[in-house]
Amino acid sequence: MDFAFMQEAFLTLLSGVPLTLNLTFVSVAFGAVLALLLALMRMSGIKLLDWPAQAYVFVFRGTPLLVQIFLIYYGLGQFRPTLQELGLWVFFREPYWCAIAALTLNTAAYTSEIFRGGLQSVPYNQVEAAKACGMSGFLLFRRITFPITVRQALPAYGSELILMVKATSLASVITMMEVTGLAAKLISQTFRAIEVFVVAGLIYLILNFIITRIIMAIEWWLSPHLRRPPAVEPRLEAAHV
């Protein structure tokens, strides 16, 4: 391998990192809102809300993300007159918004199940204790249900976030010049696929390592009851005796 070329390729592909992170966090943010709505629909006990949510999750978890991107980017073009009348064509004519839409819809399906599992893990006795203290409605959700749900769902949600970072590579098939798109362009110019893809994989590995550390730090912060108590120095123990 030519390490000098790999260093140059690293600097070239590094320029695609901002777009990769932008696609990831924008789609994850929109997907989290939609996922919470889907999770609440699933747990509502109302069939008219539960069945559409189940169908949505089934479809978007059961079909490849690449197919979903193609359907949105190429398929919606067949409905251009209708989209123009609705004022939506200004978004769906752009590859960026098509990629955001596909990534958002896909991650919402997976995240909704993560949120639903987190909501179901909230101990019933804690909810009852909060109600006995006078909490109800949004206050109960904000101070009891939501913190416990986040703590329980965070490990699985961290994995979903890592998967989304890697899933952004599929946006390169609709002309998005993120890390993988720049890698494909560089390979077409140099015909050195191994070095370029090794560098691209290294960049994704670094990004996911950083995200993993951040998730672990948040999990530690949200779980004070799992932290080890500070060690007591021998002198302090002797003083107490």
Image (tube, helix red, strand yellow):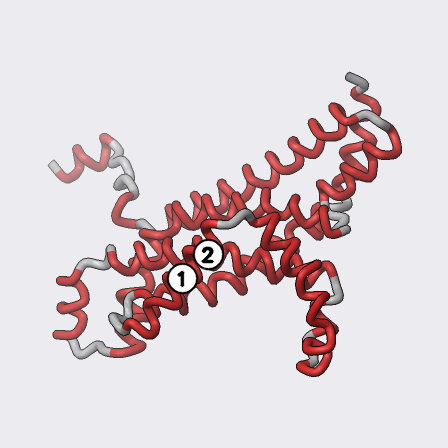
Identity of the residue drawn at 31% across and 49% down: 223
Q: Which mark is residue 55?
A: 1
- The three-letter amino acid code for the residue at tag 2 is Val
* Quarter that holds the C terminus: top left
Taking the spot 75% from the left edge, 41% from the top edge, the residue there is 14
Q: Please, what secondary structure does the residue beneath circle 1 have? A: helix
User: Is 188 drawn above or below residue 215 in the view shown?
Assistant: above
Q: Is residue 141 visible?
A: yes
Question: Percent position (x, y) of residue 59?
Answer: 46, 56
Residue 40: in sight, yes or no? no
152 with respect to 79 (left or right) = left
Residue 98 rendering spot, x and y as whole percentages = 67, 61
Residue closest to the far front:
78
What crowding class fits label 1: few (fewer than 14 Cα within 10 Å), some (14-19), or many (20 or more)? few
Circle on res. 59: 2
Farthest top residue? 1
Q: Is residue 101 left or right of residue 223?
A: right
Look at 23% across and 30% down and name the residue there: 234
